[in-house]
Image: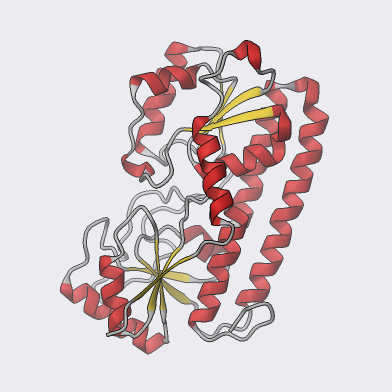
Amino acid sequence: MNRKVWTVSGSLFFLLLLAGACMMGCLQQDPGDDSRLHVTVTILPQSEIAREIGGERVCVTVIVPPGVEPHTYEPGAGQILEISRSDIYFRLGPGLLPFEDNLVERLRELNPDLLIVSTSDGIELIHGEEGMEEDESGDPGHGGTDPHIWLSPSNLRIMAKNTGEGLRLADPLHREEYSERETAYLAKIDATDTKIRGILSGLDTRSFMVFHPAWGYFAREYGLSQVAVEEGGREAGIRHLSTLVAFARENGIKIIFADPQHSTRESSVVAGEIDGMVVVLDPLSPGTLQNLEDAASHIARSYHNTSPGVPP
């Protein structure tokens, strides 16, 4: 059996440097040394939005460290105290990550004047098994509300607008600059969406395989279905793995998406059985637009798609 694991890097070195800068943030600096707006976000993909719209006017700190699973993360008392000193906190949204609701309650106690903005406001959330391809047992491998709202251009537009409005509220003196940068970022999102639609055009099979079902919003946006190796957040059983192998063979799937937050072991087992490969694509990469385009390219490649713009 041929088992391959590829890592999608792109501008990986740059993104790692950016992630490190985001994690160091600005909250540990003396406020008197920095006139920028001190912005805190929950996860790295939000930092791209804040930096694109805020530009040099903002200094961004990210709560969840790179490579850490946000679903299980818990900020410490010291980190919560630092967050409370921000000018504005862009949370992902109510009910999306376990720690966020408790964090917001604590922040309101520490700093009642802290501006807290939910970037998910206005997004149609995915609940339960929507966007999932069920196996023959009827188990889609995913429950609750899908928190991965940033993995969709339409959702990114809403998140960008919410971010822009938050920055204008926090810093009305520079509201026109934020509006101009927001418009420019929305244009980038639209351009990425156009590229993705071109890449995915003409696909006969509309299913793709992932370990962790993070790509539900992406699937909904482009009329796709994700098939999860993971079973309801647990390791897959032999019966489920056998079903996945049969499904992949029947549909000509040759690529399985994994991510740095989870083991590739089970995905590698399936890939070995279908003579395919595992592609590690981080849904939490700070380069969200490039990440979405990379995902589309690999889905198309997995079916030997020859659409323009898709390398063979």
Which of the pair 31/167 is nearer the observer? 31
Which of the pair 145/2 is nearer the observer? 2
Q: Is residue 173 left or right of residue 268?
A: right
The residue that appears at 53% across and 21% down in the rendered structure is 27
In which quadrant will I find the C terminus?
Answer: bottom right
Point out residue 127 in the picture as x, y percentages from the top left corner: 41, 53
Q: Is residue 155 above or below residue 75?
A: below
In which quadrant will I find the N terminus?
Answer: bottom left
Q: Is residue 142 above or below residue 270?
A: above
The residue that appears at 81% across and 32% down in the rendered structure is 177
Question: Residue 202 sits in which quadrant?
Answer: bottom right
Q: Residue furthest left?
A: 238
The residue that appears at 66% across and 38% down in the rendered structure is 51
Point out residue 119 in the picture as x, y percentages from the top left corner: 57, 38
Question: Residue 18 sits in which quadrant?
Answer: top right
Point out residue 242 in the picture as x, y percentages from the top left corner: 22, 80
Point out residue 56 in the picture as x, y percentages from the top left corner: 72, 31
The residue that appears at 51% across and 12% down in the rendered structure is 112
